Image (cartoon, rainbow, N blue to C red):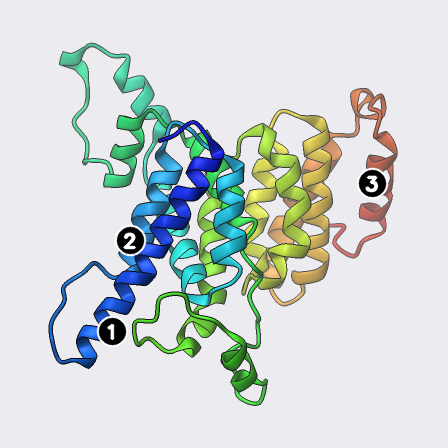
């Protein structure tokens, strides 16, 4: 809870050292046939990530430290951190925040009694964190996570070399190959959960620039991202709308050929949105040349209905 980023970085390093020390203690006790009951590394890491996401003071320096020194270096830490980011985004997505805000402003006697919110969401509310803050914080960590090796765990693709080169921070007996094989799914699910949330306007442009090269190639069904691009179109910013359509055209052109039905439906939505931008306001923008190139490419595309 310190206001000093340097102190926060030290706290993260100490917490991780404790995780590593506890794992070593459990292994040593097991080798000596004695019992030591300590929380598993995964649980400790989850608690740390939750605290970082919920704390009043957020520091990009701390997020960078976590990514550079642990997530990028160790396959087990990468797995635990990205898994928990996925979980947090999923829990936030289960709650109708607009309905909750409207209910909170109603008289006590007229408030609805619905199902209890997930524990993480309750913690967010008690700590005063908004969905927009949570989105930005999860994105700050997730965008630094290494891209998965899509060949990891497949026969004849050098898996032995991958395993020998991989490092585990807090060994628990779980094989390195497990982390390598599972990471692509964990990476994909974390991004899909995050992109299913409401995207704050100030996060739209950097996110749209990031997705085509860093995320899209690692999604098993890339067309699942089409709805995100269509929602980004309705952000309220004409420049963001243009960028979202540019990304959607790339998505449909490169990845849509194997799913004709979805391709046709999303293609029709794409052109409806594109034509809605053909107006004087768009051609008055500073970056109107980008839209003109997008319009020309779209009219020459085989996707044209």
Q: Position of residue 58 (x, y in %)?
A: 45, 32
Foreground: disc 3 or disc 1: 1
Q: CA distance from mark 2 to mark 1?
A: 16 Å
Q: Quadrant of the N terminus?
A: top left
Does the image show residue 89? no
The reply to whether dot 2 and dot 3 touch (C-beta < 8 Å) is: no
Viewer-proximal residue among 55 and 212? 55
- Residue matched to label 2: 44
Residue 82 falls in image quadrant? bottom left
Quadrant in which residue 234 is drawn: top right
Estimate the spatial distance between the alpha carbons at disc 2 and disc 3, rounded to whole Å.
51 Å
The disc label shown at residue 237, or none: none
Q: Nearer the viewer, residue 98 or 130?
A: 130
Residue that mark 3 sits on: 295
Which residue is pictured at 60% across the width and 51% down the height?
A: 265
Q: Earlier in the sequence, mark 2 or mark 3?
A: 2
């Amino acid at each position: 809870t310190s206001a000093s980023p340097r102190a926060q970085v030290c706290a993260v390093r100490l917490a991780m050292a404790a995780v590593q020390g506890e794992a070593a203690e459990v292994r040593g006790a097991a080798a000596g046939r004695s019992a030591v009951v300590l929380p598993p590394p995964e649980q400790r890491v989850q608690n740390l990530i939750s605290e970082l996401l919920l704390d009043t003071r957020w520091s990009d320096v701390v997020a960078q430290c976590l990514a550079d020194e642990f997530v990028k270096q160790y396959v087990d830490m990468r797995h635990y951190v990205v898994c928990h980011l996925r979980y947090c985004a999923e829990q936030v997505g289960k709650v109708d925040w607009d309905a909750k805000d409207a209910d909170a402003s109603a008289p006590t006697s007229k408030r609805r009694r619905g199902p209890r919110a997930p524990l993480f969401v309750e913690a967010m509310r008690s700590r005063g964190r908004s969905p927009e803050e949570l989105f930005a914080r999860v994105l700050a960590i997730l965008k630094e996570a290494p891209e998965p090796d899509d060949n990891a765990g497949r026969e004849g693709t050098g898996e032995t070399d991958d395993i020998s080169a991989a490092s585990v921070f807090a060994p628990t007996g779980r094989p390195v190959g497990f982390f390598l094989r599972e990471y692509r799914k964990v990476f994909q699910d974390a991004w899909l959960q995050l992109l299913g949330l409401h995207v704050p306007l100030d996060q739209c442009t950097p996110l749209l620039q990031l997705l085509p090269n860093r995320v899209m190639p690692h999604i098993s069904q890339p067309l699942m991202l089409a709805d995100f691009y269509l929602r980004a179109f309705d952000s309220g910013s004409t420049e963001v709308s243009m960028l979202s359509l540019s990304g959607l055209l790339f998505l449909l052109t490169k990845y849509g050929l194997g799913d004709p039905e979805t391709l046709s439906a999303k293609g029709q939505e794409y052109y409806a949105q594109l034509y809605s931008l053909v107006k004087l306001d768009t051609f008055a923008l500073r970056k109107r040349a980008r839209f003109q190139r997008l319009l020309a490419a779209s009219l020459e595309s085989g996707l044209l209905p």
